[in-house]
Amino acid sequence: MDSYEAEKLSSIFSKQRDDTLFIYEIAKIIGSEVIVRLKDGSHHSIMLKDNKNALELSIFFGNLTQKNGIILETVYSKDKVIIIWNYRLN
């Protein structure tokens, strides 16, 4: 992943004003490419380092949605993204 892809991933997983996610689903994984569908219906591609990282992103997203998670913060620097999240307490 380069810095452009890190910025894109960070923005897609950013906390929205209503504490929801802008990302709706991970539509497909093709090698190291993750295709996401956003709430507005658009699809976007994120190129990760390798297939392992693409699968880990998919698992993370599944855990986040299944556990009613909430994004607290997303930060990127160069080619790295840090997503801080917690369980929703309601």
Image (spheres, rainbow, N blue to C red):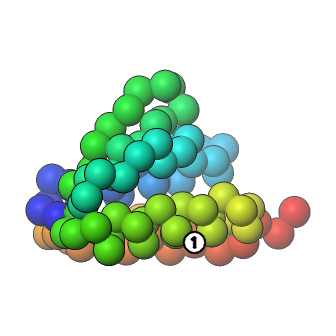
Question: Viewer-proximal residue, 45 or 83?
Answer: 45
Q: Is residue 45 visible?
A: yes
In the image, 46: left or right of 83? left
Q: Residue furthest top?
A: 41
Q: Residue 43 location, x and y as percent?
A: 38, 32
Q: Residue 87 location, x and y as percent?
A: 72, 72
Up-down relation of residue 11 to residue 62 (above or below): above
Q: What residue sits right under mark 1 in the picture? A: 85
Q: Residue at x 54, y 32 (%)?
A: 39
In the image, 30: left or right of 42? left
Q: Residue at x 15, y 53 (%)?
A: 4
Q: Residue at x 50, y 26 (%)?
A: 40
Count all numbered tags in the image, as a single digit: 1
In the image, 32: left or right of 38? left
Q: Quadrant of the N terminus?
A: bottom left
Q: Residue 42 location, x and y as percent?
A: 41, 27
Up-down relation of residue 56 to residue 5 (above or below): below
Question: Viewer-proximal residue, 20 or 62?
Answer: 62
Q: Quadrant of the C terminus?
A: bottom right
Up-down relation of residue 77 to residue 13 (above or below): below
Question: Viewer-proximal residue, 84 or 38?
Answer: 38
Q: Residue at x 25, y 58 (%)?
A: 31
Question: Viewer-proximal residue, 65 or 19?
Answer: 65
Q: Residue 75 location, x and y as percent?
A: 34, 68
Looking at the rendered structure, the kind of residue marked 1 is Trp
Secondary structure under tag 1 reads strand
Q: Residue furthest front?
A: 31
Q: Is residue 72 visible?
A: no
Q: Residues within 10 Å of mark 1 (few under 14, many from 20)?
A: some
